[in-house]
Amino acid sequence: MNRTTLSLFATTAVLAVVTGVAALNPPSGDHAGAPPRAGRMPVQRSTLLCPAPTSSDVASTTYTAFTPPGKGGAAAGSTADLLPVAGPARTDGKKDEPKKDASKDSAKDSAKDDKKKDGKKAETDPGKPVLSLKEPGKPVTATTERSDAPALLGSAAGPLAPGWTAQQTTTVAAGGGRGLHGLTCAPPDTSFWFPGASTAKGRQDYVHVSNPDNSAAVVDLELYGPEGRIKAPSGEGVTVPPRSTVPVLLSSLTDAPTENLTLHVAARSGRVGAAVQASDDKTGGDWLAPSADVAAGAVLPGIPADATSVRLVAFAPGTDDADVTVRLAGPSGSISPAGHESLHVKSGMTTVVDLGDLTKGEAGSLLLTGARGSGAVVAALRVTRGKDDKQETAFIPATPAIEGRGTVADNRAKASTLSLVAPGKEVQVKVTASAGSEGGTPVSKTYTVKAGTTLTVEPPQPADGKGVFAVTVEKVSGGPVHASRMLALPKDGVPMFTIQPIPDDRSSVAVPKAEQDLSMLNG
C-alpha cells in the first residue's frame, strides 16, 4: 500500500486552505514573560468540492449553501461562491467511452441552457458562480436539469467561512441509479477510505476525484477485497490536471468483479476531493462519502427504522488485525445483534456482514468498539429500504463526533429525520433550524440523548418558513455525540432517500497567543 508523506511546507499549506487562516492575537504587555497560550479563532477561508452530480437525462439537482450566523454578521461585500471546476467533463460512457487512463479523458462542455425550475437557475459559465451566499443564517439554492452539469469548486472567506456548508441533492427519475443521490460537498485532503464500493455486475461505481489547485495532483486508486489487495495497475499514478475533475469507473480498473470492496484514494502529490457515486440496476443508488479517519472503533449513526437490509463493510488498513465488538444503539439502550456480537477484520482485507432487518422497526446506530491492542478500522453501512422492484439504497459511513457544531443543508418540511447517538456518556445538544431560503424565522430546541442510545427526531422547522432550510447541531454538554440526517422524498412507490453524516464543521482553529520578547534588545 502506498503511503503519502507530506513535508512540513505541504502540511502547513493544507491546514491553511482546509481549516482557514486565523489571525493571531495581538501581543499584550500584561503577561510579559509568560509562555504563549493557545486560543481558538474563527477560520478565515473554507474550500469545498462538489462532484459532477449526474449523467442522467431524467434528473434534477438542487444545490444549497449555508453559513450559520456568527458574532458580528457578514462583512460588507463578502461572499461564498460555488463555481464550475474548469477542465475535463465526466467520462462515463454515456457520450464518450471512458479510457482506463482517466487522466487523459476530456470532453467539451455543453452549451445548452438549464431549464428554469423553482428557485434560482444554476449558471453554466465557467467564470460565473452557480451559487453565491452573501449573508449568514439564510440558505440559498440553485437548480439544474443538465446531464453534464460540472463539478464545482467552492470558496468562502471572512465571516462567511466558519461553518460554511454546501449540499447537492439529485433526483434520478428512472434508469440505472434511479433514486435520491445526496452529498455534502467536502474540503480537499490527501487520503480517503470508501468501504462499501463495488465492481460487481449490475453495479456502476464511479470515484470522482477533483483538484482545486493550480498544479496537477497525482493519486493512487487502491482496491481491497475479501482476499486482500486487488491488482489494478491503471489506478496507479492517475494525474488530475489543475482545476479539474476526473471520474473513474471502478470496474474499469480490474478484470475481477467484486461485490464488496474498499477503495482507498491516496494522493502522491497535491490534494484532492473524492466521493463515490454508486448506481445499482435493481436497488437504485446514492453517493458514498468517505469513512471517518482510521480509528480503533467507529460510530455509524442513523439506520432507518424501516430498513429491510443492512450490510456492514469494514476494513483494517494497518498491519494488525482488528477485533471489534458490535452493538446497536436504539432508542432505549444498546444491544448486541444475535450472531454478530463481535467482528474479526484481517489486516488488508475487506470484511462483510449482512445484518438483515437489524432495526426491527426502531431506528438506531451501529457502534464498533475496538478491543485493547487490536488494529484500527474504517467502516460503512449499505442500507436498503423497500422491497422487490421498489427498493432504494443509501450509505452511512463511520462518522466523527461533533466537538462543537455541525450543519447539514437542504432540509425540507416533513422530509428530514435527524439521528443523534451518544456512544458513551449522556449528552445535551441544541438543534437549530435556520430561516427558510424563501423566508421565515430560525427555531431552536434542546435535546438530551441518554448514554448508549440513539435519539431520532424530526428537526424543528423555521417559523413561517418557506423553501429549504439548514439544521445545525451544537453540543451543549456531556459526552461525545455523532449525528446524521436522512432526507426522504418518496416517488411512485419508491422510498427514495439519502443519508448524510454530520461531522464537526471545524469552524475555528487553535492558534498560539503571540508574545513580544524584547530582551535581546536590552543591554
Image (tube, rainbow, N blue to C red):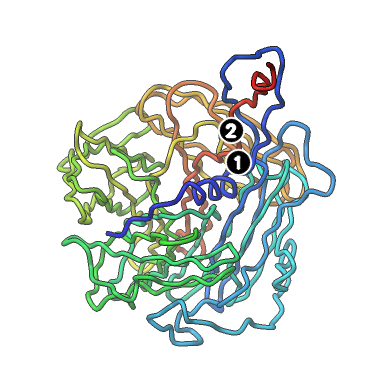
Tell me the amino acid under the disc marked 1: Val
Residue 341: give x, y in percent of width and height.
18, 38
Q: Position of residue 68 (x, y in %)?
A: 67, 39
SS type, badge 1: strand
The quadrant in which the C terminus is found is top right
Camera-side residue: 480 or 429? 480
Image position of 355 (left or right of 120)? left
Q: Tell me the residue that label 1 is attached to.
A: 471
Q: Which mark is residue 368?
A: none
Residue 331 relative to residue 127: left or right: left
Q: Please, is residue 178 above or below residue 194 in the view?
A: below
Q: What residue is shown at x 24% (from left), y 69% (from top)?
A: 258
Q: Which mark is residue 431?
A: 2
| Residue 412 showing in the rendered view | no
For this orientation, the residue located farthest to the top is 30
Contact, CB < 8 Å: mark 1 with mark 2? yes
Which of marks 2 and 1 precedes in the sequence?
Answer: 2
Q: Is residue 157 above or below residue 272?
A: above
> Is 445 placed left or right of 363 in the picture?
right
Q: Image point 69% across, 22% down: which residue?
A: 521
Indicate the amino acid at tag 2.
Val
Q: From this viewpoint, which residue is outermost toward the bottom? A: 96
Q: Secondary structure at mark 2?
A: strand
